C-alpha cells in the first residue's frame, strides 16, 4: 500500500500575492522569512528574490496573523 502525499498548495504561496503598502529592508525580510517559515538563509534569500519586497512583507504579515 502506498501513501498519498498531502497537497502542496498553500494560500501563503499563491502566485498572485498582493503588495503591502511598505516593506522593511531586505536584510530584515530575509531574517524574518527564516524565522517565520523555518528556512535557511539561502532559501530565504531565494524567497525574497522571487517576490517583490512588498509581496514578501504581505507573506510575513499573513503568517504572523495566522499564528496568533
Image: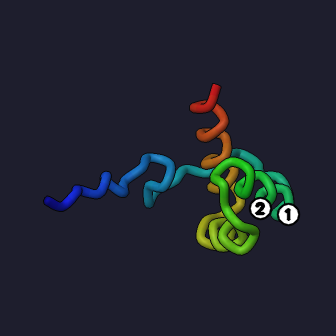
Residue 19: x percent and y percent? 61, 51
In the shown orientation, is residue 4 left or right of residue 40? left
Q: Point out residue 30 in the picture as x, y percentages from the top left corner.
A: 77, 61
Residue furthest top in the image: 68
Residue at 18 percent across and 61 percent down: it is 2
The number of callouts visible is 2
Q: In this view, does 25 lie above or below 67?
A: below
Whether residues under marks 2 and 1 lie with C-beta atoms below 8 angstroms apart, the answer is yes
Instruction: Indicate whether 52 appears above or below 35.
Output: below
Q: Quadrant of the C terminus?
A: top right
The front one of 67 and 15 is 67
> In the visual, does 40 lie left or right of 63?
right
Alpha carbon distance from label 2 to label 1: 5 Å
The residue furthest front is 1
Q: Name the residue under label 2.
A: 30
In the rendering, which numbered label is found on residue 64? Answer: none
Give percent across and percent down for residue 4: 23, 56
In front of the other: 39 or 29: 39
* Residue at (73, 57) in percent of width and height: 34
Look at the numbered disc 1 and give the secondary structure of its residue: helix
* Quarter of the image where the N terminus is located: bottom left
Tell me the number on the disc at residue 27.
1
Please determine whether, in this image, residue 61 is positioned above or below residue 39: above
Q: How crowded is mark 1: few (under 14 residues within 10 Å), some or many (20 or more)?
A: few
Disc 2, SS: helix
In the rendered image, residue 50, in percent from the top left (x then y), is placed at 60, 71
Dot 2 surroundings within 10 Å: few (below 14), some, or many (20 or more)? many
Query: Where on the picture, by quarter, is residue 26?
Result: bottom right
Amino acid at each position: 500500500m502506498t501513501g498519498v502525499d498531502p497537497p502542496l498548495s498553500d494560500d501563503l504561496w499563491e502566485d498572485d500575492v498582493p503588495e503591502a503598502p511598505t516593506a522593511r529592508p531586505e536584510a530584515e525580510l530575509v531574517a524574518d522569512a527564516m524565522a517565520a517559515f523555518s528556512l535557511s538563509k539561502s532559501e530565504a534569500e531565494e524567497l525574497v528574490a522571487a517576490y517583490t519586497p512588498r509581496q514578501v512583507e504581505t507573506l510575513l504579515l499573513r503568517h504572523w496573523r495566522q499564528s496568533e
